[in-house]
Amino acid sequence: MRLTFVLCLLAAQAVFGQKITWQEGKRLTWDNFKSPVSKKKNPDVAAYTHCGWEFYSVKSSDPKAPVTMTIKTVFHEEKSWKDAKRMDDYILLHEQKHFDIAELFVRKFRKAVAEKIKNSGDYNKYFKAIYDGISDEYKNFQMAYDRETRHGIDKEKQSEYNDSIAEQLDNLKSYQAFEIPQ
């Protein structure tokens, strides 16, 4: 039985690939981008960062019972790619900012959950709306980031975003912990 479980874990890791959890000061490297190049949608893109968040919660059927939630930012190596002919530190920084944006919105997500959800009843009532709102805001921000920086080509706009993202992450530093206390 134990051998089967270990084999299933190894198979799952091979199928789902490696995930990197966002950490302060830890930066992506080009070695983290392991997927084959995919330029079907936009042939001008030099790299693609597949990142987002994972969360899980433990709640009760008792609406007054506390909820435990963990939310973290992840980068999927096996779904992220780079054009080896166009790799440079500047493009890598642009891709890092996509990952940082994901962390920024995870912190906003944690903050909203911490402020609104105190028990299982609150979770049932508010969680979906919080998730949907933050998710939509996140997607729109990621698209605006690429559009306004022209995928990092506009160095002035890229610099503005770099500063803004760093400032917002700092402003939400108290929501850096994975687990949301109740």
Image (cartoon, rainbow, N blue to C red):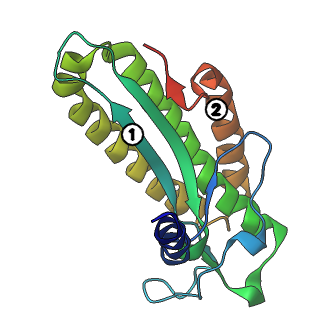
Give the image location of residue 149, x and y in percent: 60, 59
Q: Nearer the viewer, residue 158 or 136?
A: 136
Q: Nearer the viewer, residue 41 or 73?
A: 73
* Mark 1, residue position: 56
Tag 1 secondary structure: strand
| In contact (CB < 8 Å): disc 1 and disc 2 | no
Give the image location of residue 129, x and y in percent: 22, 33
Give the image location of residue 92, x and y in percent: 74, 66
Q: Nearer the viewer, residue 90 or 64?
A: 64
Vertical comparison of 110 with 103: above or below: above
Amino acid, disc 1: Tyr
Q: Residue furthest right?
A: 89
Task: Name the quadrant containing residue 171.
Answer: top right
**Residue for point 77% across, 54% down:** 27
Vertical comparison of 120 with 107: above or below: above
Q: CA distance from mark 1 to mark 2?
A: 22 Å
Amino acid, disc 2: Leu
Is the residue marked by circle 1 packed among few (<14), some (14-19), or many (20+) residues within 10 Å? few
Residue 165: numbered disc: none
Task: Name the quadrant containing residue 28.
Answer: bottom right
**Residue for point 75% across, 84% down:** 86
Q: Please give left or right for residue 48 compared with residue 65 in the image.
A: right
Residue 169: numbered disc: 2
Quadrant, the C terminus:
top left
**Residue for point 44% across, 89% down:** 40
For marks 1 and 2, give the one nearer the viewer: 1
Is the residue marked by circle 2 packed among few (<14), some (14-19), or many (20+) residues within 10 Å? many
**Residue for point 66% across, 62% down:** 95
